[in-house]
Amino acid sequence: MRRSLFLGASALTLSATSLVPALSEPVSVQGPLLASASSAPIQVAVRELDAAPAAEPLSQPVAPPVRLAPVPAPAPRIASVSQGTASWYGPGFFGNRTANGEFFRPGTLTAAHRTLPFGTRVRVTNLNNGRSTIVRINDRGPFHGSRVIDLAHGAAHALGVASSGLAPVRLEVLR
């Protein structure tokens, strides 16, 4: 009796909370889990769900997605242009602090310049092969001869300067 009362109360609670559809038709439930002192079947009301309406065909064909061309980024303005010789520095300085306090890491696109403010972005073009990259000034130097910039190891590889050590370059300071 207790189990039948519990099941009936549970079914009513679930139907009231809209978790189960409303009950309308009685169904007989029997089984080993529902065996009680009296072996009479328990009556539980169940309602059939309404059949879902058939989907209507689309009246118009669906157009393929429109692919937009990427909008090019505005070209950075050039504040000044200079030329000179570039050198590079790298493996012996990895882990040391640069002049602005950062740790020097392998593969970075940074450089050292004598006078440009830290954080200045400079487009460096190797005049021997035409390759260019943009570097960020984070150190001071070079302090050797007529060199105008010291490239970090990653920037030197990007420009093709790592094997020769020195190369003529054009510097374009970007705003």
Image (tube, rainbow, N blue to C red):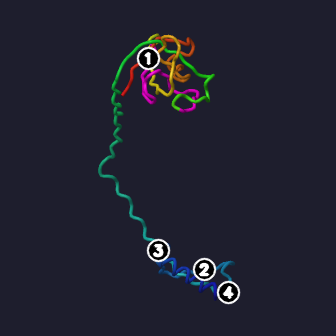
Report crowding for label 1: few under 14, some 14 to 19, many 20 or more residues within 10 A (C-alpha). many
The amino acid pointed to by label 1 is Thr
The amino acid pointed to by label 3 is Ser
Q: Is residue 112 magenta?
A: yes
The residue depicted at 33 percent of the width and 26 percent of the height is: 77
Residue 96 shows in the view: yes
- Name which of mark 1 and mark 4 comes first in the sequence: 4
The residue depicted at 54 percent of the width and 33 percent of the height is: 101
Q: Dots 2 and 3: beta carbons under 8 Å?
A: no
Q: Give whichever of 11, 80 is nearer the camera.
A: 80
- Name which of mark 4 and mark 3 comes first in the sequence: 3
Report crowding for label 3: few under 14, some 14 to 19, many 20 or more residues within 10 A (C-alpha). few
Nearest to viewer (mark 2 / mark 3): 3
The residue depicted at 60 percent of the width and 83 percent of the height is: 6
The amino acid pointed to by label 2 is Val
Question: Which residue is under mark 3?
Answer: 18
Distance in Å between CA atoms under marks 1 and 4:
93 Å
Question: Which residue is under mark 1?
Answer: 125
Nearest to viewer (mark 2 / mark 1): 1
Work out whether 27 lies above or below 110: below
The residue segment tinted magenta is 101-126
SS for dot 3: loop
SS for dot 1: strand
> What secondary structure do most residues of the magenta stretch adopt?
loop
Nearest to viewer (mark 1 / mark 4): 1
The amino acid pointed to by label 4 is Ser
